Amino acid sequence: MTGEGGTVMKPLPKPQLLGKQRRETGIAGTVRRVGWPVVEAVYNLGGGLRFSWSLFARSGLALRRPSLIIDHLRQIGVGTLIIILVSGLFVGFVLGLQFYVLLERYGQVEVIGAGVALTLFRELGPVAAGLLFVGCAGTSITAAIGLKKSSEQIAAMEVMAVDPVARELSPRLWASVLALPLLTVYFDAVGVIGGYLIAVPQIGLDEGVFWMEMRERVFFYKDFALGIFKSVFFGFAAAIISLYEGYYCVPTAEGVARATTRTVVKGSLAILGLNFVLTAFTIE
Amino acid sequence: MLHSRRQTDFVVGLFVLAAMAAAVFIALRAANLTEFYGENGYSVRVRFENIGSLGQRSPVKSGGVKVGQVKAISFNSEDFVAEVELWIDSPHRFPRDSIFSIVSSNLLGGQYVSIEAGGDDELLAGGEVVEGNSALVLEHLISKFLFDKAGE
């Protein structure tokens, strides 16, 4: 097959093991049953790496035609915006209240703003936005790709010598990688406003003190930009997992449903695990 | 396509623009973007016997007003004193005999360098080295108090 770039493209092979294991009894059977999920997980990891590599390698079309990315940015980014804004506001409210309870015991209520902003910028913003993103945009990616597969649109594209990975999958990857950091910025900003609404009109802290303490203790690069940096990685992880689950789902209604569930499970765990690793590496 | 291209472009453009506005809001309101030291300023090296918990970027205040920040802290292994490099914003000039001391902003920490202006006609120039009053260390205070009590 020749794609729009003129390069020869093969459809991605599905990572699968040969045949289903026979049900066996005895010790050997037990060992096989325990070992099977492990082997399958390793197999999926290898397949996932091959899949991610081809997503990157075939993103030339998406980068040449940014309108492909922009179309998905509307669905993925703008579609998730409302839930991000509302949850950010409520997370800011709760952080404001909890920091008030904590700081009041030490007579340090003035630093409430700094506490809210640091928690949001460094951890809660990127992670909460990432988890919401997986639940909202990741599932929609998996469902869209899975449905295209079950209604044989993917196969039809291959027949028309259009590379489905370059035309359908890669643009979604890059749209996610652009959308999640932007959504994290929204989450951070709205959360700070939520903290302000609790601290100043509700608790009665002086407005000037609130902002001054925040500015004094929170740094743009060291705290805020660090969180945005993390969210770029979360964008990659969420998109690759959603696309993988959608592309390799069993092409039935039941299969798409299972794939969507797996996207949420794997995507959330990937973000939380990745967050730990990134935090451990970037902490001073 | 569900939506027309122009409409999509507009909505996405608005999305990106508002995110930028949010980032600017954070930069100006919530986070300290001025991590770089202002171009207009001069540095003064102050020698302290003990700097307590003073750190890089700790504020430098005079009369309670922030006039600069701590740029670097180093240990002079010839004289065994701490050398603190202060970056003072250029509109603020101080007489030569000003007193530099390290004080606490509250009981839980948060120390800063306080400058009390002296009466000298000559002003401190950039790069000068002056002596400062050390930070009050709680343990030293307690032991001094105990020795005084024991002496009575």
Image (cartoon, grey):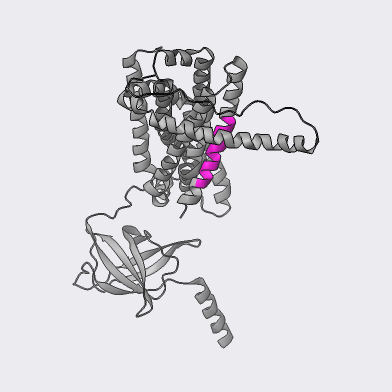
Residue A88 shows up from this direction = no
Q: Residue A250, located in which quarter of the rendered image?
A: top right
On whether residue A274 falls in the magenta region, the answer is yes
The answer to which of A250 and B151 lies nearer the viewer is A250
Residue A106 lies, with reference to residue B79, above or below; the image says above
Residue drawn at 52 percent across, 32 percent down: A47
- Judge from the rendering whether residue B132 lies leftward or rightward of residue A93; answer left or right: left
Residue A263 lies, with reference to residue A207, above or below; the image says above
The answer to which of B10 and A90 lies nearer the viewer is B10
Residue drawn at 71 percent across, 36 percent down: A32
Residue B35: x %, y % from top left: 33, 52
Residue B8: x %, y % from top left: 35, 18
- Which quarter of the rendering shows the N terminus of chain A? top left
The answer to which of A104 and B19 lies nearer the viewer is B19
Residue A46: x %, y % from top left: 53, 36
Residue drawn at 34 percent across, 38 percent down: B24
- Which quarter of the rendering shows the C terminus of chain A? bottom left
The answer to which of A240 and B43 lies nearer the viewer is A240
In the picture as drawn, the residue positioned furthest to the right comes out as A26
- Residue range highlighted in magenta: A264-277
Residue A142 shows up from this direction = yes
